[in-house]
Image (tube, rainbow, N blue to C red):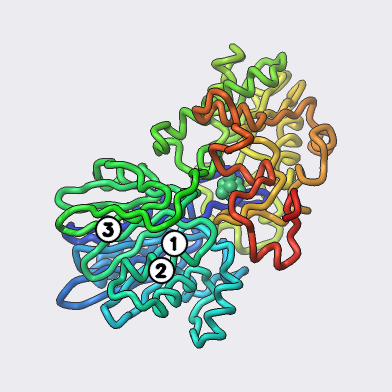
Amino acid sequence: MHSHPFDDDELREECGVFGVSCVKEAANFVALGLHALQHRGQEAGGIVSYAPEIGFSQVRRFGYVRDNFTKASLMETLPGRLAIGHVRYSTSGSKGPTAIRDVQPLFAEFSMGGCAIAHNGNITNAVALRQELIERGSIFQSSSDTECIIHLMARSIQKNIPERMKDALRRVEGAFSIVAMTRSKLIGVRDPLGVRPLMLGSLGDGWVLASETCALDIVGADFVREVEPGEMVICTEGGVESVFPFHPVKPRFCIFEKVYFSRPDSVIGGQSVYESRRRIGVELAREAPVDADLVCPIPDSGTPAAIGYSQESGIPYAMGIIRNQYMGRTFIEPTEQIRNMGVRLKLNVNRALIRGKRVILVDDSVVRGTTSRKIREMVMEAGAAEVHFRIASPPTQWPCFYGVDTPEREKLIAATMTEEEMRVLIGVDSLKFVSLDGLYRACGEDAGRNDEQPQFCDACFSGDYPVKPTDMIERGFRTKVPA
Ligand code: SF4
């Protein structure tokens, strides 16, 4: 989980997807996998399973996986050797309280049998597609953009589900990592740019698809490989069939997955997420050194970068800020008064350590800046001599349209202020962000960012959107370089 769940000063993760085939009581494995992916979405989750005697079964619930999908009485309603699941934080569809009909996996019955789909990402031409589909007679049940895929599949004239899915996804723009199932197949697809992750694992005679490797680990599956950008894998008892249904393009994986979203124990592109975050700290220490007594992370997500900063600078690492481990969301709901305590409920300063010290605080990102200000207040109250902020990502200046919930551009502090203006607003002695090149180096690109052909999606930092955000442009969003 990330550091500031009581404040809207954070980027919300998108979604997590998981599927497993050819194992007994598949839904139990899915529940475990979703539990390991809970950091990617805490609002709701769902599982669909298939057993030949019974057909498809589905359960969708609000709340944490551990509070829903652990009860034997409920798991018994999800029988079968094939199952997929989804955890979500709403990135599209209904804003405000999500309707249960928007909770995935979505299920549809076609003439050739049923199909369930779980989607991580965001479709950038969903509004236009929905309009077209409605005009041609489709009746939408949810506000989820994923439902477009179902209706596009329904209109396809292909004879089987994987072929219909290919037809549908060729019409869809944006970011998608999809885990789907039919009565006999587990299907995984990544968009041509491979913006969101998707891993393939094996478990006994069966197959596993998961957003991150940490979810393979929890069920004891072996990592096989990543599903490649633009690839569709069709897993059956017989093995894995691989096809590439899209026009090939140079992949651009989401660099923010490495900085922020993925769990540090996950491996992406052959590099551990922990290691890339530690190396961001190394880059920061080189780019923005400062004389100080302690390097302290804002827990938990600032921790690996703080370790790297300390190792590179030789300044001792210490836990100057301690996280309250067991703060559930429910506690915060009742009163406005408690809500206003915000950061204090989640984080506390280790006063005895901080007093009189020059402290470097390492955080993962600055979104609106409100959390940073509160943390700085708490640290100063505790008697720190100096406070220096080091941020393990470049300034977040642009919204994400590929499945991460970001505030509008005007609300992103870095979109409207210079670094010095932000420093004054937050009230710290110094404020430095890692450079975009430094971030690329930390992610294994030793020569930094290739501006001609960027190796990653970094639109939230650079404004360089690899897929045109069609729907948003339609609503008046202005890109950096007008099309
Ligand atoms: S805009 Fe940022 S968060 Fe969104 S996919 Fe690109 S790098 Fe990731």
State the residue in front, 13 or 482: 482
Q: Residue shown at 77%/26% (left/top)?
A: 430
Q: For numbered disc 3, what is the local secondary structure?
A: strand
Q: For numbered disc 1, what is the local secondary structure?
A: strand
What type is the residue that disc 1 sits on? His
Whether label 3 lies within 8 Å of ligand 1 gets the answer no
Foreground tag (1 vs 3): 3
Report, in whole angstroms, how far the alpha carbon at label 1 lies from the one at label 2: 16 Å
Dot 1 corresponds to which residue? 119
User: Residue 381's quadrant in the figure?
Assistant: top right
Sooner in the amino-acid sequence: mark 1 or mark 3: 1
Residue 47 numbered mark, or none: none
Dot 3 corresponds to which residue? 234
* Residue lying at the far top of the rendered structure: 314
What type is the residue that disc 3 sits on? Ile
Residue 167 numbered mark, or none: 2
Whether residues under marks 1 and 3 lie with C-beta atoms below 8 angstroms apart, the answer is no
User: Residue 135's quadrant in the figure?
Assistant: bottom right
Considering only vertical position in the picture, is 318 above or below 76? Answer: above
Q: Residues within 10 Å of mark 2 (few under 14, many from 20)?
A: many
